[in-house]
Amino acid sequence: MLEVRADALPANDWSGGTHPYRISHRKLGMWLFIMSDSLTFGALLIVYSYARFSSENWPTPFPFYPSIIFSSSMTLVLLSSSLTMVYAVSAAKRRDKRKARRWLLATMFFGGTFIVLHMIEWLRLINEGLSPSRLPAEWATKWPGASAHFGSAFFGITGLHMFHVFTGLCYLGFIAARIRKFSADDVEVSGLYWHFVDLVWMFVFPLIYLLSVDFHP
């Protein structure tokens, strides 16, 4: 019976490739960070959900206009930044670093716009009297016995997410400024972080805003 030695087979006979688990240390480190940070946001959102649904009179302070329209615009801006990030990674893989830098700057523009819009939303709520430790007097009248934890939960979760967006802007700015010295893999790793930040908002937005819509005039 004819025997064939394993090492005599061509390396490309296996369609999966010769190194299916090869990954750069930067990408591996980013994936590990994303996994650990997912646990942080997951725990915060679970605790918020428990407080939200266990409270008999949780405030629903966001009217459809302007709050939900405004926050939806913020969401659209952040989703647009994910699209430009995809184009940046694609350009980097084609070794077109000039276009990669332009798309990174476009991503930073949308990310910065998101932060500005979010700060406007914060200032509006602060001017109404909302703080991490107390509710506005009007809210206390409208929702008697409402939990003051709403303020701490709102500012804590959205503030942590906004900090991640700001960190991402600094990260992308560093990559864009030195794009000629970085590889396509470096751009892709920064894109992993940015897409993670966008994905987190897709959970924060419905839990914080859409479940707290005020349908009463």
Image: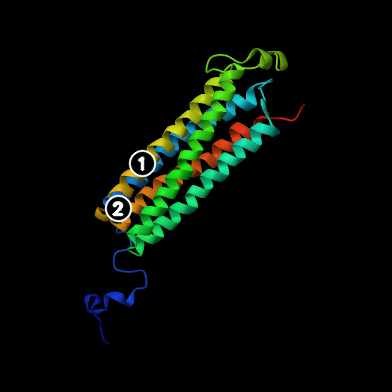
Mark 2 vs mark 1, CA separation in Å: 23 Å
Looking at the picture, how far across and down is residue 137, in whole percent?
65, 12
Foreground disc of the pair 2, 1: 2
Q: On the picture, is 198 further left or further right than 69?
A: left
**Who's the residue at 41% across and 37% down the image?**
37
Between 58 and 117, the one lying in front of the other is 117
Q: Residue 63: percent from the left, percent from the top?
A: 69, 30
Assign a secondary structure to mark 2: helix
Quarter of the image holding residue 32?
top left
Quadrant into which the N terminus falls: bottom left
Name the image quarter holding the C terminus: top right
Of all residues, the one furthest to the right in this rendering is 217
Q: Earlier in the sequence, mark 2 or mark 1?
A: 1
State how many labels appear: 2
Q: Is residue 26 left or right of residue 133?
A: left
Number of other residues with Cα within 10 Å of mark 2, as a class: few under 14, some 14 to 19, many 20 or more? many
State the residue position of label 1. 33
Is 159 situated above or below 188? above
Tell me residue 9's x, y (percent): 26, 79
Question: Which residue sits at x=46%, y=33%?
Answer: 162
Q: Amino acid at mark 1?
A: Phe
Can residue 19 be seen?
Answer: yes
- Residue closest to the eye, 209 or 107: 107
Residue 173 drawn at (x, y percent) = 35, 44
Please, is residue 189 above or below residue 157 in the view? below
Q: Where 84 falls versus 10 (above or below)?
A: above
Q: Amino acid at mark 2?
A: Ile
Marking on residue 18:
none
Residue under label 2: 179
Badge 1: few (under 14), some or many (20 or more) residues near its Cα, within 10 Å? few
Task: Check disc 1 and report its element: helix, strand or loop.
Answer: helix
